[in-house]
Image (cartoon, coloured by chain):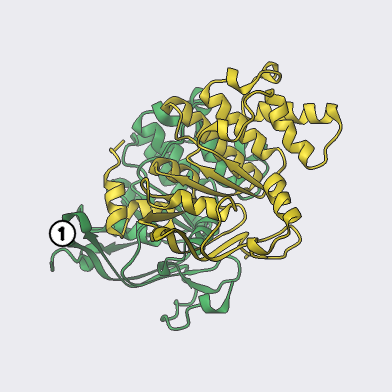
Amino acid sequence: MTDPILSVRGLEKRYGSFIGCTGVSFDVWPGEVVAIVGESGSGKTTLLNCISGRLERSAGEIRYRMRDGRFPDLADLSEAERRFLMRTDWGFVHQNPADGLRMRVSAGANVGERLMAVGERHYGDIRRTAGDWLSRVEIAAERIDDQPIAFSGGMRQRLQIARNLVTHPRLIFMDEPTGGLDVSVQARVLDLLRGLVTDLSLAVVIVTHDLAVARLLSQRMIVMKGGHIVEAGLTDRVLDDPRHAYTQLLVASIPES
Amino acid sequence: MSLSSITPTHPAMPEGALLSVRDVAKSFVMHLRDGVVLPVVANVRFDLFPGECVVLGGPSGVGKSSILRMVYGNYAIDEGSVLVRDPENGEVRDLGAGDPRLVLAIRHDGIGYVSQFLRAVPRVSAVEIVAEPLVSRGIDRATAILRARDMLTRLNLPETLHGLPPATFSGGEKQRVNIARGFITDHPVLLLDEPTASLDAENRDVVTAMIGEKLARGTAILGIFHDQPVREAVATRTIDVSAFSARKAA
């Protein structure tokens, strides 16, 4: 069996005396989707921001498997290594695409920019790769020179996904990636994500309050409440046989389809 | 796999068994109903050998589906163990210990499951749903799609439906997609939860024949069949689940 790509131990984030999350430990393996679920204020987004290096932790360990096999704590990385992770090896899909895109440069440039950050210089190659990725996320080729402000919400989200995946990252963080979309648009984005995650064998940590999204995308699930993990396990086990009172409440709150 | 994950304290599996359920107990604790405890089964104990079709019998609500779900790792167990052989090295492993990655590995290579209902994924066509387990085993996509088409054709699913997502299919059509998906791989253990419940006689006979072929190849099947002709045609042994039911005592 392979080694984990990400390992979190005893993670805590305090805002003054308020606890964002505490005592959080889990591992993520390559090619695996882990969903973090819980209601607003449960600490799931705080947790995501800490493990993706966007927020400073108060205590605990976060280790990441580098491409050369080393497994350092993120806090011990050099600035250059950290930049490499952010630009190449990791992706971050925000709930609001405007937070992850540059809204006034073209769709092609939004995707190409990540390539340039990893040293790609040939304009023709960049444009071709950007075009490939737009088609993979089902954006018509003739929209390559349009700015995302002219795109619908679903298209923007698909563009953000393309921008993240173009550098072949190994780990993607997602914060409610379908949260702001209409239900019909959600299904398309979800299906697209599901296909890409499988084809590219990505490791994903996805934060969502939507248990249907968690069921569709993830193999394992972590349930948070009040900054603590209250239950964790195989996604279908947690949803079909919830053990903790809070998980039972969450599951009981979904209308039967 | 680490040494600590082997379970020497468990009673050994009999020689040749693919699955051994040992003293398994399960209840549901309903926290939203003042913590009321609903016992389901207790002292569940049986073995499953290659080439046999063991039928879980007994009235509705006695815990047959729950046993299948525990064996598949979909329900957690309170006591006992579900021993399986690691498809890779033959080591005995306890699926009931609740290690999600072990359950995923066993589902990939050891235990297949045909549930009563197909959980359809938006926008994914029937033929892709059926081919997916092969693709995830590294089989070339085009080959997997061809085999999926053959399987669906054998189950009399009209070719015009192969390329459509099953969301709008009838109950029987969905069930045939589900059966095709479950039967396309060669898992050594196959769990069947009423696979013929919403099929007509013709398709029931197809499924009966498919079960026979699996058994002939040495697959071990554990199933629930309310359909008497099918049950009589495939069962090599019946386990009366009433004997394990925890409800009558409660």
**Pointer 1 chain:** B
Q: Residue at horizontal 58%, vertical 75%?
A: B2
A86 relative to A138, above or below: below
Q: SS class of the residue under badge 1?
A: loop
Q: Is residue B217 left or right of residue A182?
A: right
Q: Residue at horizontal 56%, vertical 53%?
A: A32
A121 relative to A16, above or below: above
Q: Quadrant of residue B235?
A: bottom left
**Residue under label 1:** B34
Q: Quadrant of residue A23?
A: bottom left
Residue B49 visible in rendering: yes
Q: Quadrant of residue A3?
A: bottom right
Q: Colour of chain A?
A: yellow
Q: Position of residue B41 (x, y in %)?
A: 24, 65
Q: Position of residue B185 (x, y in %)?
A: 55, 49
Residue farthest along the front direction in this orientation: A16
* Residue nearest the observer in this picture, B210 or A160: A160
* Residue nearest the observer in this picture, A164 or B217: A164
Residue farthest along the right direction in this orientation: A122
Which chain gets the green colouring? B
Q: Residues within 10 Å of mark 1 (few under 14, many from 20)?
A: few
Amino acid type of the residue that numbered disc 1 sits on in the rendered structure: Asp
Q: Is residue A25 left or right of residue B43?
A: right
Q: Is residue B91 left or right of residue A89?
A: left
Q: Position of residue A199 (x, y in %)?
A: 64, 42
Quadrant where the N terminus of chain A sits is: bottom right
Q: Residue at horizontal 65%, vertical 33%?
A: A162
Residue farthest along the bottom direction in this orientation: B9
Q: Is residue B217 left or right of residue B236?
A: right
Quadrant where the C terminus of chain A sits is: top left
Residue B186 visible in rendering: no
Q: Position of residue A224 (x, y in %)?
A: 39, 55
